[in-house]
Each structure stands twice: as C-alpha cells, then as structure tokens.
Amino acid sequence: MRSVVSVVKATALEVLSEPLTLLVQLAALTMAVLAPAFHYHQFGEATRMARDAGFSALFTCGSIMAVFGTIRAFRREIESGTLQMALSHPVSRGGFFVAKTLGAAVAYLVFAATVLATSLTIIEGARVGGAYAERTGDIARLSGPFLAAGVAVMLLPLVIGAALNRFARFRFVPTAIATALMLALLAGGASSVLDPALLPRHLPVAALLLCPALVLLAASAAFAVRFKANAAAAAVGIVAALCIPAAGNYYMADALSKGGVVPWSYVAIAAIAALPAAVAFLVLGIRFIGGRDVS
Amino acid sequence: MTGEGIIELVDVRKTFRDFWLRPTVNAVDGLSLSVRRGEVFGLLGPNGSGKSTTIKMILGLLEPSAGKVELFGLSPRSVEARRRLGYLPELSYLHPFLTAKETLGYYAGLCGIPRAESRDRTRQLLDMVGLADVSSRPVGGFSKGMARRVALAASLVGRPELLVLDEPTSGLDPISTKEVKTLVKALAKGGMTILTTSHLLADAEDICDRVMILNHGKSVAEGKVGELGTSLEEFFLAKVGDADSFKLAPFLSQSEATTTRSENEEAARDNRD
C-alpha cells in the first residue's frame, strides 16, 4: 500500500507541475467563463449558457488534460529510465501501472474540481444576476460584474502559478507568455461584453479564444502519431478511461445546476459509462507493461 | 562467504528483435554464472559486450530469450526476490522535480518502508553521501556527481542483501570514486553481496573478489582476481584486446597520404611562384 501511495503522490506532483497543465487549466477556465457564453446565448438564459460553457470546457480541456497528463507521465517514466529504477524495487509491474494511472487521475481530479467549482459559481451568479435583472430590468449593469468575475476566475490559476513559480520549486509557463495570453483573452472578452452589437465582427476573437485548446489538441495528436502502435492503443484507452467519466460528470453537474440534486440514475449512467472503459484500459495497460522488456 | 548461490544464470541468451520480430542482435549468448553470498563479483568487458543486458535480466527488467535466471532461488520478476536487492543503474535515473529527500522517500516507499523509518533512513543516507545540506533541492538541478550520489543512496535505502552496481563510479571525480570504492568495500565487509560492472579495471581489481570477462555476449574468462597470475588490465587486454582494437592503419595511411598530397601541392605552388 505504501508503495502505491508513493507512486500516486509522485505522479500527481509530476503532472500538476507540468507547464502544460497550467495552460490547459487556463484554457478550460477561459472557455468556461467567456468563450461560448457571450456569443451564442442571451442574458435571459444565463444559467443555461454558463452551464453549457463550463461543461463543454470540462469535456474538451478534460480530454486534453487526460491525454497529455497521463501519456506524458508514462512516456517520461519510460524514456528517462526511472521505470528501470522503480521496477528494480519490490513493486509488481501491474501495481506500478495502476498506481501511476491513479496518480494521473488525481491530477485530473484537481483539474476537474477547479473547472466544476468555477462553473457552479458562475451558474449561481447567473441565477442571482438573472433574478436581479428580471426584477429591475437593468441588464446593462450586470456586464461589468460578470466580466470582473470572469477575469478574476481566469487570473486565479495564473496568480497561483506565479506564486508557486516564485516561492515553491515548480517552474510553470513563463509569466510573460501567460500575461500576453491573458491580455488577448481579456481584450476579446471585454469587446464582446461591452458591445454586443459588434458581435458578428468579432468571430475571429471567438476563434482566438479556442486557439489554446486547438493547439494542445493538435500537439496531442502529434504525440500520438509518434508512438508505436501498441502505445497508440494505450493512448486511446487512456482517453476512453478518463474522458468517458468526464461525460458522466457532465450529467451530474447538469443535475446539480437544475436544483442541487443528483438523481441516482445519473450516477448509474456515469458508472456504466466509466467502468468498462477504465477496466479495459487497465487490463490492456497491465498486459502491455507486464510483458515488455524495460531497457 | 557461505557459498550459497544468490544469482544463478544457466545458458542464458538474449536476442533483441525489431518491430517485425526479426532478430537484430544477440546481446548475450549462452552465459552461465553464479554469484555467491558475501562476494564482490565483477562483470567486465568492452562496450557492447552484454554486461548491462545481463544485469537487466538479473533484475527482471529484460526477459531472457532462452536459459534460466534465478535471484535468491526465485524468478527475478518476483516481488519477493526484488525486496532483497538494490540497484544503481549506469545513468542516474531520477525524477527531476523531486528533491533529494523526496527521491529517497519515494524509493523507500517503493520498498514498503514505514514513513517514520523512511525519514530516519533518508537522513542517514543523505548524510552518508554528503548531500544533507542540499536535501531540499530538486535533483533536476544537481550536477552529474551529486545525482550519482543520490542514486547510490536510493539503491541502499531498502538495506538490500544484494547490491547491483552498473558502472558505479561513472561521472564521479577521483575523490568521489575513492569514496565509492571505500563504501563498496565496507558494505562487502558487512556481508552484503555485490555485483558490479566497471570499465575501470584498476577499480575492479581493488574491490572485486571474482571477475568474469565478457566479449560479444559470451564469457571469455572467469576467476578470482588474485589467481589471474598477472594484473587484471593485462589479463583483460589479452582476452579481448585484439578483438576490439581500433583499426588505425587504414585511417592513418589515408591521412598520411592526404598530408603528403597537400605538401606536394604546396611545393608545386611554390615552384610556380
């Protein structure tokens, strides 16, 4: 048990300290807060748009996070030779694989919890704001608080990242790049919020907002292509195992947004969707690592 | 020395194959060896002779293509066998994001050592390898020598009965090399069985009780260091020197011809001028 805990902890730390994790997190929160909300919805349906934005971000960026985090954790272990060191210790290959996967899943849970918490906060804010607008008829005054809340949420991981960069041992993405990215997103978001009449002209801004996610998706595809056939199969397994539960999360969060109660049927749907994929992935992975020469 | 065999290899072969399962290289070819409890056994040979492949089969990292490998009478893949061994690889494979203290804690965890004991042992080992002052720094920023010391400490964290050292002094300065040799001798004196590879024959001569010389995956000689009748270096060169000597003559004659040609051209230019 102690060996499993050691591997889980080291893997979660490894995935969370990846600069890409911060970028994906940033992209997810950006998508949740700004991307689809101000382009495809009306203020009258605020809770629905916040929910859609949040959960599409969770699903899209969650896929990227799952692919990147998990594949990189395994790949680095093999390429850097630390797998040799680990497997020369009294830990079974299957146990090590499961622990490594659990570590990546812990990192994914941190990501999912952040996006989910942000989305639920926005949903609640939209509900309160919607009620206020309905009561007073003053919709324009809500733009400012909405924008401020969005920017604050987006800035949070950046501030945390910068603090860790300064005070802890983690080395995240260079602050200058992150700041430039933030400014571009802020400009796009601000123009969209403050001048809805110009929306049709601002479609490129929407595309820009999705760029980080698309770049990461393309990069992950490039990584997958570089792998050999068996590793690619493992990658598909990883995506299936970690993304399908994300789809389950969608249903559960959807239920939460409708009144705070998750019906058991949703829990069952999520479990039914997640379990076979996770089991298939683990069996494939254990077979893959179990019979493989490590050199 | 009790004579009990800790490592047993019987007619072991290892053939590496490509993606289409076509054989590419016979790294180890019919190797048999036995390492007894309490001895320091040296596996020597030129680059590509199969030393590291042999060690990886002993550790269960590589599956032999044929033959039998036993560690403490068990399969090297068994967790029970690996509970009793420590391994220092040729390169210090460490997680760069972990500190020295966390690295040893991680490997102590893999050995199943309880947390409190792991902390004590980590402190002792870091002190032993002279890294107590930098124990909170990530190993990614360490020099090659410092990383080597961390890896050495990691190999000892489980208090193994058998220590497998692949080029233990690789990347170390002369002082650290001497310290490692002293440590190996002390560990052997304390009853630990040690299997080591080295390119530095003088080092092997200093620390090994018995050596085996490998060439092209086969054993070409085996015996006690004191019974070789000559220095280990002379013995080694006699066994494998000819087979692996550089083919200098064609290259030297070519460069001699080039030099002569350019000298002639220079002389011709001088004459024209």
Image (cartoon, rainbow, N blue to C red):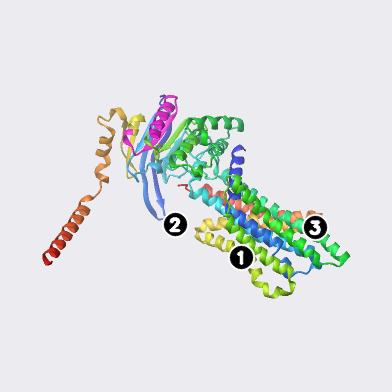
- Identified by mark 2, the residue type is Phe
Residue under numbered circle 3: A124
Q: Secondary structure at mark 2?
A: loop
The alpha-carbon separation of the residues under discs 2 and 1 comes to: 37 Å
In terms of secondary structure, what is the magenta stretch mainly?
Answer: helix
Task: Tell me the residue at 67%/61% (across/down).
Answer: A30
Q: Which of pointers 3 and 1 lies earlier in the amino acid sequence?
A: 3
Residue B79 shows in the view: yes
- Direction front: furthest residue: B273
Q: Secondary structure at mark 3?
A: helix
| Chain of the residue under the numbered disc 2 shown in the image | B
- Identified by mark 1, the residue type is Cys
B103 horizontally vs B34: left or right: right
- Residue A295 percent location from the top left of the image: 45, 47
- Direction right: furthest residue: A135
Residue under numbered circle 2: B19
Is residue B191 one of those drawn in magenta? yes
A67 horizontally vs B44: left or right: right
Q: Are marks 3 and 2 on the same chain?
A: no
Which region shows up in magenta? B175-202
- Residue A230 percent location from the top left of the image: 52, 56
Residue under numbered circle 1: A211
